[in-house]
Amino acid sequence: MSVDEAAPRWFTDALATPVDKGTVEVDGATIAYRAWGDAGNPGVVLVHGGMAHSGWWDHIGPQLAAGRRVVALDLSGHGDSAHRSHYSLESWSAEVLAVAEAGGIDGRPVLIGHSMGGIVSFAASHMQGDRLHGVVILDSPIRDLTPEEVEMRTKIAANAGPPKVYPSVDAAVARFRLVPPQDTAEPFVLEHIARESLKQVEGGWSWKFDNLRMGREGRGSLESMAPRCRVAYFRCERGIVDGALAARIGRQLGPDTLMVELPAAGHHPMIDQPLAVVTAARTVLATWER
């Protein structure tokens, strides 16, 4: 049985949902996004993690789109967006707000960010909180480096060359790995994400992210940041945030922050517990919308 044949109905229905794709220019870089639901509705911006892309949300976004406009972007240096010579939380935050407007969200959006994307969302909540309805953070260490950033900085320090070129899509997909490694994953989700991570290059296929320049800069500023909008934080039970770090994050986010644990979830919950992510997001959105 193929992965497609093994995928449940909810997953195939989500991927079959009509999607709008577009781009917007932000500080000299072309930023790609995809969107579900009717333009002109209140909405959500989905922010992926390091070395990832907007396709990580393809099975999540459509399930949040009832009565909403849901936009997922490729941060610069990722997916189908342009690469920059320098990446910062400020530029990524600007990209998130720009796609909210260009993607057709009416009013102040809610940001839902995973890992590095959660850190970008947290930074946006401090720098541009008056333009946000709220922020949902999924298993982000905030001031600590994410595993993806550690991996990328190690490659940069080792003077790693361009990403490896594979002779075929299938050969590349067979080499796709999560950072950090995760024992549990829905295979149909993992394969879809892996295939969406590739671009055709001379000689074959390679990964889309910027292998030579990725890595967040200016992290010291995070220590003095505090959110200026409502925040919900979801720690994954089998993720990268232990109890001590969660307590520290809770103190930084403030006493009004909703902090909840996603049971049995690894660091990439949209891959091993996708319906739990949908349920958590729907619950927070419905509460805030009231």
Image (cartoon, rainbow, N blue to C red):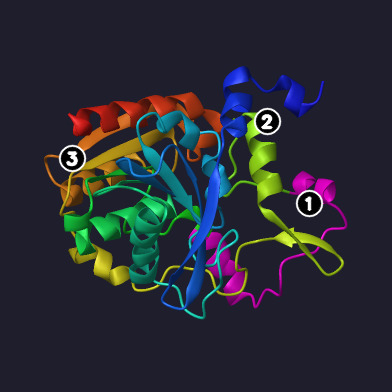
Q: Is residue 6 above or below residue 249?
A: above
* Residue on which the image places disc 2: 187
- Mark seen at residue 172: 1
The answer to which of marks 3 and 1 sits earlier in the sequence is 1
**Amino acid type of the residue that numbered disc 2 sits on in the rendered structure:** Pro
Residue 151 sits inside the magenta stretch: yes
| Disc 3: CA contacts within 10 A as few (<14), some (14-19) or many (>=20) | some
Magenta-tinted stretch: 149-175
Please report contact status of discs 2 and 1: CB closer than 8 Å, yes or no: no
Residue at image mark 3: 257
Foreground of the two, 53 or 65? 65
The amino acid beneath tag 3 is Thr
Disc 3/disc 1 C-alpha distance (Å) = 41 Å
The residue shown at (44%, 37%) is 37
Q: Residues within 10 Å of mark 1 (few under 14, many from 20)?
A: many
The residue depicted at 60 percent of the width and 61 percent of the height is 80
The answer to whether residue 190 is left or right of residue 122 is right
Q: Distance between the residues labelled 2 and 1?
A: 15 Å
Compared to 20, does 116 lie above or below? below
Q: Residue at x 72, y 21 (%)?
A: 6
Report the side of 103 relative to 3 (left or right): left
Quadrant (top left/top right/bottom left/bottom right) for the C terminus:
top left
Q: Label 3 vs label 2: CA separation?
A: 33 Å
Please state the horizontal and vertical placement of residue 23, each as a whole percent of the image.
Answer: 51, 62
Residue at left offset 54%, top offset 67% = 77
Pinpoint residue 163: horizontal percent, then vertical percent.
Answer: 72, 67
- Residue 91: percent from left, percent from top: 38, 70
Relative image position of residue 42 (x, y in whole percent): 29, 41
| Amino acid found under the numbered disc labelled 1 | Ala
For residue 240: magenta?
A: no
Check disc 3 and report its element: helix, strand or loop. Answer: loop
